[in-house]
Each structure stands twice: as structure tokens, then as C-alpha cells.
Amino acid sequence: MKIISFIGPPGSGKSTQIKLLNEVLSKRYNTFISKVPKVVFKENDILPYLNELEVAKINDFQQDGINAKNNGVLAPILFDQILYSCICRIEDKDIIMLDGSPRGLSRAELYISNKLLKENTIVINFEFGEKTYEQSIIRQFSRAVLKSNVEKALSEMNRFKSKYYVYDKDTKPGLSLLKEIGIPICTVNALSDKQNIHTQILAFINQQIA
């Protein structure tokens, strides 16, 4: 099993690239896409891998997870713990793609404390380069406008800012820890052409799982 972690600022194209990669990789491998919100909402594809105790804990803290998502902040680390434990029990998949996880230093520390995760993970790191904050906000706003309308997107501006601050203050230190311990990392320019990014990431993945 190979775990591919996609890390980067909000709006950098992580989910877009995961979708593109899954279309290619699923032709050769059994793939699985996951992220913390799937645990919070007990989505159908992850539910079979959760045990009864985990489901009970999710039920107890689900509203906290939902509130965190709505406010653009980190969900309680309990959900990350459940996600990481769940991944280790997934035996019928060859490749697991993690969208935005581990997110935060404490979560990265938790992640690498698991030998299976530490030894089988590679990371795709998305960066904007200059004006990362501005690029992140613009992309989040544009995405929200296309999904709903300008007024709704404007009402979510504080959430967009919060999501970026989580990346800046929590996710980046966690990424530095992953680099320090030698986890293979491919850094891509999020402002590049979508297809060029896809080609770069796919080449890296093929190299790592050859």
C-alpha cells in the first residue's frame, strides 16, 4: 500500500489534482480517496472501515467537527486519530490519497508515530510562491462564486481567511517535520498549468511506486 498525502494552501488545486490522478491510477490500482471530513460525516465509502467504538466517538463529537469545518479551523484531533487508524486497516486498496492531511504539527507528529504510515507515505506539496495569502483567498472566493453566487461567497470570506491561517500557522510546520524525517516530497507550483502539474505529479508517483 502507498499513501499519497496532498498538502498545500486552500484553493491550490489539491482536490482537482486528486480527481485527475485517480482517473489514471484507478485503471492500474485499487485506489481510495479520504480526508478528515469523510470521518466527521461518516461517509459511505469510509464507514465500512470504522469500528463500533470509532463510530460512537464520531457521534459524540460530530457537531464539533461540523462547526470546525464551517468556521475554517481544524477539527478536533480525535477525527485525525480515527482517520489514521482507519487507513491502517484498509487492506483492499493499493493507493490511498489523503486530501489535506496531515494538517498541523500535532497531527503530523501523530501521523509519523505510526510506523506503517511513516514508511509508506509520499507527499505532494502545493505552493503558490509569492503572495500565497492573496492567491489562496482569490481562488477560494472564485470557487465559491462558481458554486453558488457572489453574495454567498462574500459571506464566507472570514472562513476563507481562517482556512489560510490554519495552513500558515499549523500545516506548514507539520510539512517541515515530514521533510525533516525524510518522507519523499514533490513540490509543485500551484500557479502552473493544470495539465503540467498533473504530469509532474504522476511522474513522481510512478517513480515512487515502481
Image: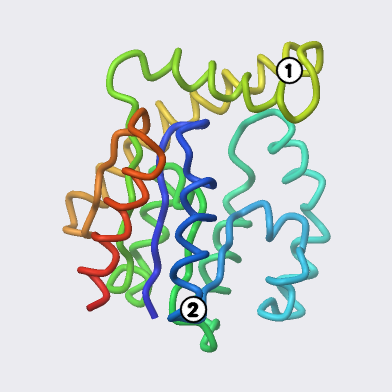
Q: Is residue 38 above or below residue 117?
A: above
Q: Is residue 166 above or below residue 204?
A: above
Q: Earlier in the sequence, mark 2 or mark 1?
A: 2
Residue 6 percent coordinates (x, y): 42, 51
Q: Is residue 84 above or below residue 16?
A: below
Residue 130 is left or right of residue 46, and the answer is left
Crowd rating for badge 2 (residues with CA inside 10 Å; few <14, some 14–19, many 20+):
some
Residue at disc 1, secondary structure: helix
What is the number of callouts on the image? 2
Residue 78 percent coordinates (x, y): 61, 56
Q: Quadrant of residue 194?
A: top left
Residue type pointed to by label 1: Ala
**What quarter of the picture does the N terminus occupy?**
bottom left
Between 57 and 6, the one nearer to me in the picture: 6
Residue at disc 2, secondary structure: helix
Residue 35 percent coordinates (x, y): 58, 56
Q: Quadrant of residue 163?
A: top right
Rendered residue at 40%/45% (across/down): 7
- Marks 2/1: CA distance? 37 Å
Rendered residue at 54%/83% (across/down): 89
Q: Quadrant of residue 143?
A: top right
Give the labeled residue for mark 2. 88
Between 7 and 57, the one nearer to me in the picture: 7
Give the labeled residue for mark 1. 153
